[in-house]
Image (cartoon, grey):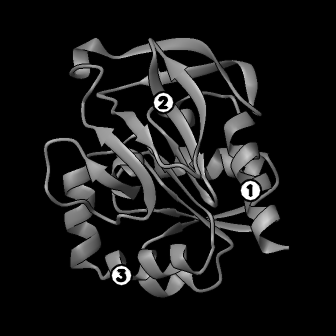
Amino acid sequence: MKIGVLALQGAVAEHVRLLEEVGATAVPVKKVEELDDLDGLVIPGGESTTISKLMHKYGFMEAVQEFGKANKPIFGTCAGAILLAKQIQGQDDCHLGLMDIKVERNAFGRQKESFEVLMPVAGVAADYPAVFIRAPYIMEVGENGQVLAKHEDKIVVARSGHYLAAAFHPELTEDTRLHKYFLDMVKEYRS
């Protein structure tokens, strides 16, 4: 399985390392044509507006939308979840608009309110170490989606078909279980 990590901003190397630890061939993606031979894609955290501007600048917006519409799995973490969402609270438009979720940006506060918590994630772990940094949360999940985790009654991990979104930064831990879950999704959609 070859999984790309969109390498425009964020903790790219950390995602690559965890994906390789669970058995994937992982590559940073800096050019649109690199999407062609991928089985899955991770959109890392960072700043969603900045990543969106860079995606437009380098032609990734339509290319990633086509990638998703071709039933290739995409995993968005933190800002990546915002980029995937069909709706963003307080905004008329969205970025990629691929995943049927509504998100609230910076829902857990600013940088200084960052925190880490052990939490259950359905199908992944009873004790996943989630790192929240200026994290969004998922307000709503479409009718075909699944809520996989909540923190303080807010949805923080959801899946809808071949899309996976996490409000936190799984790449900032040594825990590979969420990346393994995504790799299993990729295998499921490839077969």
In the foreground, 28 or 100: 100
Q: How many numbered circles does the render carry?
A: 3
Q: Which image quadrant: the N terminus? A: bottom right
Q: To which residue does mark 2 refer?
A: 156
Q: Position of residue 70 (x, y in %)?
A: 59, 81
Residue that carries the numbered disc 1 in the rendered image: 185
Given residues 47 and 96, the one toward you in this image is 96
Q: Is residue 12 left or right of residue 136?
A: right
Which amino acid is tagged 3?
Glu
Badge 1 amino acid: Met
Q: Earlier in the sequence, mark 3 or mark 1?
A: 3
Are dots 3 and 1 in contact, CB under 8 Å? no
Whichever of labels 3 and 2 marks the residue nearer the N terminus, that label is 3
Residue under the image location 69 percent in, 72 percent down: 39
Alpha carbon separation for disc pair 2 and 1: 18 Å
For disc 1, the neighbor class at 10 Å (few under 14, some 14 to 19, many from 20) is many
- Could you tell whether 137 is left or right of 178 in the image? left
Is residue 126 at least partly visible in the picture?
Answer: yes
Q: Position of residue 98 (x, y in %)?
A: 43, 64
Q: Position of residue 104 (x, y in %)?
A: 27, 36
Q: Which mark is residue 62?
A: 3
Residue 119 image-quadrant placement: top right
